[in-house]
Image (cartoon, helix red, strand yellow):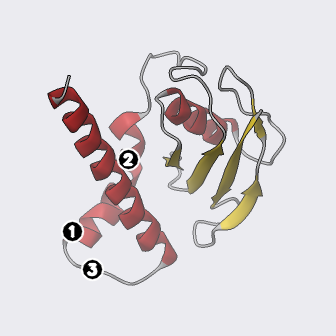
Amino acid sequence: MATVRISGNLHSHHQTEWVGAPAVSPDGRIERSVPLSDEAYDAIERQMAGGAPEGIAVLADGRTFHWFLDGSIPRGAGPATASGRTGGFDQLRVLLPDIDRIARGELDGSERQTDVIRLLAYVVAELLRSSEDAANS
């Protein structure tokens, strides 16, 4: 059975901490065995359902959770969202003030800013990969 390693802003926006490595069922559901909100579990499950082996889930309150899937689940496995969306850019909207500060060159070296920069790099890489895959199909 696969597991997912999770770390993130569990108790504070300013400190990243280890959350745990719960099991993941073959249908893409994460065992609710570590102290995460349903919002965090759902965001990670949506990303796994899209085929991502790792990612950063961004919650509405701005907290981020980094995750890495150990093992594999079938692509497309995972719970469906009520709206049919896969998370996408809607989750990033909460980070717009941080992104604007970075774009203006207001770099402070904080852990949060580092997390936002890593998230943006991840999003750009995924967009480039998906456009490359579309071009090769």
Quickly name the residue at label 1.
Answer: 103
Name the residue furthest right. 33
Quarter-wise, where is residue 129 in the image? top left
Quarter-wise, where is residue 71 in the image? top right
User: Considering only order in the chain, which callout, 2 or 1, is on the residue closer to the N terminus?
Assistant: 2
- Asked if labels 3 and 2 touch by Cβ distance under 8 angstroms, the answer is no
Give the Cα distance between marks 3 and 1: 7 Å
> In which quadrant is the C terminus drawn?
top left
Residue 127 percent location from the top left of the image: 26, 42
Which amino acid, by three-letter code, is at mark 3?
A: Glu
Residue, x 55% and y 37% (percent of image)?
Answer: 43
Residue, x 20% and y 35% (percent of image)?
Answer: 131
Residue 25 percent location from the top left of the image: 74, 26
Quickly name the residue at label 2.
Answer: 92
Quickly name the residue at label 3.
Answer: 106
* Mark 2 surroundings: few (<14), some (14-19) or many (≥20) residues within 10 A: some
Name the foreground residue: 96 vs 45.
Answer: 45
User: Considering only order in the chain, which callout, 3 or 2, is on the residue closer to the N terminus?
Assistant: 2
Is 80 located above or below residue 47 in the figure?
above
Q: Describe the element under mark 3 as helix, strand or loop.
A: loop
